[in-house]
Image (cartoon, grey):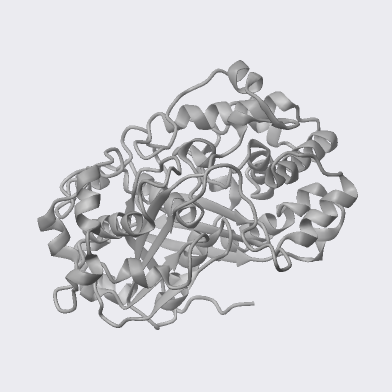
Amino acid sequence: MTKKPASPAYVVGVGLTKFIKPRGKVDYTELGFEAGIKALLDAQLNYDEIDQGVACYCYGDSTCGQRVFYQLGMTQIPIYNVNNNCSTGSTGLRMAREAVSHGAADAVLVIGFEKMSSGSLSAHWKDRAEPIGTTFQMMAATQGVTNAPGAAQLFGNAGKEYMERYGATPRDLAEIARINHAHSAANPYSQFRTSYTIDEVESSPVIHDPLTKLQCCPTSDGGAAAVLVSDSFLSAHPHLRPRAIRIAGQCLATDSPSLFDHSSMNLVGYHTSAHAAQQALSEAGTAASEIKLCELHDCFSANELLTLDALGLCPRGKAHEMVRAGDITYGGRCVVNPSGGLISKGHPLGATGLAQCAELVWQLRGEATNRLVKGVRVALQHNLGLGGACVVTVYKRADGRANDDQEAEKEKEKWAWLGYNAAIEARGFSKQQVDRVRSRRARSSWALGETERRVQARF
């Protein structure tokens, strides 16, 4: 077991790029730079105030993180490169919280980015054992193998097991996807912003029974970033406190032997998700019944069904009843994935966990005005990676107020450095704004190269 945090950690800045189809037109250096600049502007901090950097990505050579961070400054701080499959971004967030909470740093910048290949995920190293090879071997032994993408088989099989155990139907899975696509229409960063009827979801091409195409997340290019600070740093910068969001509880869990207990649900991390949620909620002093806002890892609609159950958002075996009652969208018991989730927003692996963080920060600040889940004081995040790792994080406003409190409304005017509400506008920044947050004492034009010009050209 890890030690409990010695002091609080707060998210004071977030930044996000649009998530786009992986066509090779935008490099990871640009995605990381854009997200990092936006997070620093949101935090109203210069890079010289950052003590550590964490770079999150899955596809790329060693030290891609330095390549991205050096564009912001070459201040000789520690920079860590993190790869933990689809939970990479949240793993970086966890590392930053550990550093801040235990006194190793007062301010940490976490940047996640991914430049992916089109099509379904596949192994890149063919001359060595695949990390999740034993997982696929268990699937082959218990369910057999088809020509469908491996991840779709794993999660599709898990969905079928849940249906067989508890009475859910393929239409419940389609409804989950319909809701996520509907939510994404209000998110300017989403890769897809088209709404569909449930019949359109069901009639899209079958990928692996019971999953259709519109129930599967796409591959994506994108970047996201967050700035975490200590309590003492926040006290020294009191103007940041009204918009600071505290990480009240968090758990990074790996698999137990139940991974190989012949359950298709556990093979994709059901038991791991349940354990991580219990630990994070316990640390936060929050019951699952109090959660009215959640961003969870809906790589496939089947995984959202399982995860509603694993997180305790419904009674065991009743996730489909929650879906049917309209309790995963606005007006229901808990709004799940107001961003559109992975299914519609997109899934650039290294950025996904930090994009979830950004959405929940914007929601808790009351800034996501076109999709606001009103009256919330706490939010839950779930980010899963096969192989495996699951990170569950509980966020609370530092001031304890609800996100639609009248006093909180006044704080939304404090976008002094960015100049607009980034929660509802996917815009860029000026050269003057870049100059304001790049290192003053250790910047390098050689390290920056053409990145700023290329990013500006996209705006």
Q: Is residue 321 left or right of residue 452?
A: right
Q: Which residue of the protein is positioned furthest toward the right in this rendering? A: 141
Question: Which picture quadrant has residue 64?
Answer: bottom left
Could you tell me how many numbered marks the image carries?
0
Q: Which residue of the protein is positioned furthest toward the left in this rendering? A: 432
How far across and how far down the image is residue 385, in percent?
A: 62, 57
Q: Nearer the viewer, residue 59 or 311?
A: 59
Q: Which quadrant, please, contains the N terminus?
A: bottom right
Q: Is residue 253 left or right of residue 229?
A: right
Q: Nearer the viewer, residue 285 or 269?
A: 269
Q: Would you place residue 101 above or below residue 364 in this image?
A: below
Q: Is residue 434 left or right of residue 156?
A: left
Q: Would you place residue 67 above or below residue 305 in this image?
A: below
Q: Nearer the viewer, residue 416 or 199?
A: 199
Could you tell me if residue 377 is visible in this image? no
Q: Residue at x 65, y 21 (%)?
A: 202
Question: Which picture quadrant has residue 149?
Answer: top right
How far across and how far down the image is residue 430, in percent?
A: 14, 51
Q: Which quadrant, please, contains the C terminus?
A: top left
Could you tell me if residue 1 is visible in this image? yes
How far across and how far down the image is residue 144, in percent?
A: 86, 44
Q: Would you place residue 3 above or below residue 265 in this image?
A: below
How far across and how far down the image is residue 274, in percent?
A: 68, 55
